[in-house]
Amino acid sequence: MPRVNRREILADSEIQVFHVVNRCVRRTNLCGRDPLSKKDYSHRREWVRQRLEFLAGVFAIETLSFAVMGNHLHVVVRTRPDVAAAWSDDDVARRWWALFPRRKNKDKSAAVPTEEELQQMLNSPAVIREKRRRLSNLSWFMKCLCEWIAKRANQEDEVRGHFWEARYKAQPLLDEMAIAACMAYVDLNPVRACLADSPEASDFTSVQARVRDRHESRKSRTAAVQAVELEHGRHAGWLAPVELSPKQAVAREKSTERRSSNKGCLSMSLDQYLQLLDWTGRQLRRDKPGVISGELKPILERLDCTVDSWLDLVRNFRKRFRTEAGRPNSLAGVSALRRACRTGSPPH
């Protein structure tokens, strides 16, 4: 069956969520330990993570989840053309310069543009209009990610040729259930591949970054400060927040240049997502050898979450997760999680 043309699923004027996958050429471990050559390229996984963080602060595209594996990459992204439309022309020009500078510093970073250099773009409304479109376009986002990694890796190996086997594959995620399931799938990739025993031990994943910020935020005394440090932490502050409507609104009011907006992605808190992820990781799959050991304590216990705080979160669930119209959100996964907390049985 022929692959669907990207033009049929990518809409430049709509907010869309995609699961994006790209694999190294011949599925070799060009970002891990190569079993044939015995060379270790694991440091390149940090390249990918750093590049994703950089692009999150430039593009109007939000990263919801990611996992950098030894021979492939998973990213869940949300395009935000509405955010790009609100940028000034000067902002668009500066963001484009950060991606494709005409002058660079000695360390190859983008030099600060002069007013004359910016004016060359600003003098052409058509150029600015096209740059604005590209800054919320998934294909341009992946080009700036994969091409940069490929060039740097080839330079390190002193070779030429392909680093990625083909263009990226993108699967649209059409509802909240699909987004939640895909984020869990991506975050559990190292566990399923037997590279980690638990989500928080999964290197180069979004869940590990979120857990680290969660742990550091717990050191703060007030709930408001905890909420801000949780959503703007140094590890995952460039990722889109998990919770759509946090209890502490101050977390969403803080401005940031690390991502295009502070909009969340799921109708559940980070703790609820972690518990759902933990339960999912404990289920055996015939096609995957990895599973979270049944001997491990539940993830919220491993992360020092008190029983009282968790019960309070569940008890006030309906109050905290209502739509603006006042109707409860109908996310089936959250409902199943609530039933599991009440009855002690796993979600169906």
Image: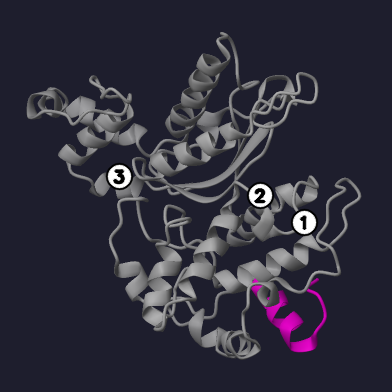
User: Where 179 sits versus 124, above or below?
Assistant: below
Tell me how far mark 2 sits from mark 1, CA to CA.
15 Å
Tell me how far mark 1 sits from mark 3, CA to CA.
40 Å
Give the residues in magenta: 333-348
Q: Residue 333: x, y in percent?
A: 68, 69
Q: Which residue is mark 3?
A: 84
Residue 135 in the figure: left or right of residue 153: left
Q: Amino acid at mark 1?
A: Asp
Tally of numbered discs: 3
Image quarter of the N terminus? top right
**Viewer-nearest of discs 1 and 3:** 1
Label 1: few (<14), some (14–19) or many (≥20) C-alpha neighbours in 10 Å:
some
Q: Which residue is mark 2?
A: 186
- Name the foreground residue: 335 vs 97: 97
Q: Residue 67: x, y in percent?
A: 62, 45
Contact (Cβ within 8 Å) of mark 2 with mark 3 = no
Residue drawn at x 58%, y 90% as measured from the top left: 312
Q: Which residue is mark 1?
A: 197
**Viewer-nearest of discs 2 and 3:** 2
In the rendered structure, which disc, 2 or 1, sits on the residue that comes first in sequence? 2
